[in-house]
Image (spheres, grey):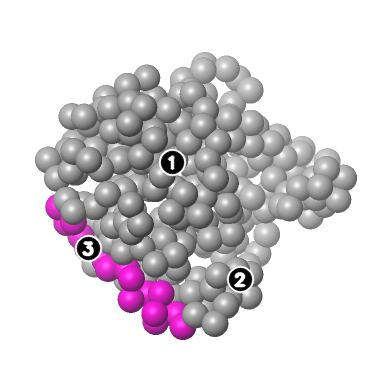
Amino acid sequence: MSKLKVAVVGGGNIGSSLAFDCALRGQDVVVIEKDEQSCEQSRARVTETAGYAPLFSPLAKGRKPEDILGNIAWATELQAVSDCDFVVENIPENIELKQALYAGMAGFIAPHAVLAANTSCIPITKLGSFHKRPEQVIGVHFMNPVYMKHTVEVIVGLNTTEQTRDRCLEMLALLGKKAVVVKDGPGFVSNRISHLFMNEAAFSIQDGIALPADVDTIFKECFGHKMGPLETADLIGVDTVVNSLDVLYQVFQDSKYRVCPLMRSMVDAGHLGRKSGKGFYTY
């Protein structure tokens, strides 16, 4: 296998970043959105990324944005996944929406394809139960921005076969990604831990202990993190963080995952982070 046809279902921040990264590496990509307006928004995000990526990625230096974008198509119909080897689901962290999507894709995804759930916290075994071939469902947790992250978290569900895992790892290698394989569980490793960081950081702001920049500076300059927890929440999307924490709370029934009221109020106010222009910081 030397070339992939990749379907990215859901072209939000992470989906658009993934589409760009796959296209940058010479793979054919189709981004599937719910309507034409969403397609245009996704196309704008990819175009913006293509403009500034050469500043950060050696792979993008000297590449014309139009050449990269030429590897990407947009569609609004789920049958666009039918000729794809690698199908990555990136829709919002809402289990009802995901159940409807997996049922809708079931008649189109090829038997040889890998269906990768880029979910934040929902168990992969649960998502696999929504698909008629649960053995081909695996979790692949891409981090944002995808083209700058060379390692991904891969989650094996109870029904995921070794064949699916091996094919997935082979495909990720073609995308320049190293995989860390873990077992299934709510939040897996990365989000089970990182969302507690972000939530407690938000509580420290709500309680008046520190300013956002102070919190993030401690994590960056004392612990060596590249980004602080509140910068990370703004990058991911405060609404996405809240939804993920709600999932963790529902599954574990553990109060440590209760959402900081400040973040819920921010979502109500539309202060979602980078994508809205305002979150813990103003952009």
Q: Quadrant of residue 109?
A: top left
| 279 relative to 196, above or below | below
Query: Which of 265/113 is in front?
Result: 113
Q: Which residue is mark 3?
A: 75
- Say whether residue 265 is magenta: no
Whole-percent x, y for residue 37 in the image: 28, 67
| Mark number, residue 169 | 1
Q: What range is drawn magenta here? A: 64-80
Q: Earlier in the sequence, mark 3 or mark 2?
A: 2
| Mark number, residue 26 | none
Whole-percent x, y for residue 28 in the image: 31, 64
| Residue shown at 18% from the left, 43% from the top | 110
**Which structural element holds mark 1?**
helix
Q: How many marks?
A: 3
**Residue contact at pointers 1 and 3, CB within 8 angstroms:** no
Q: Which residue is mark 2?
A: 58
Query: Which of 171/17 is in front?
Result: 171
| 160 relative to 267, above or below | above
**Which structural element holds mark 2?**
helix
Q: Earlier in the sequence, mark 1 or mark 3?
A: 3
- Say whether residue 71 is magenta: yes
The amino acid pointed to by label 1 is Leu
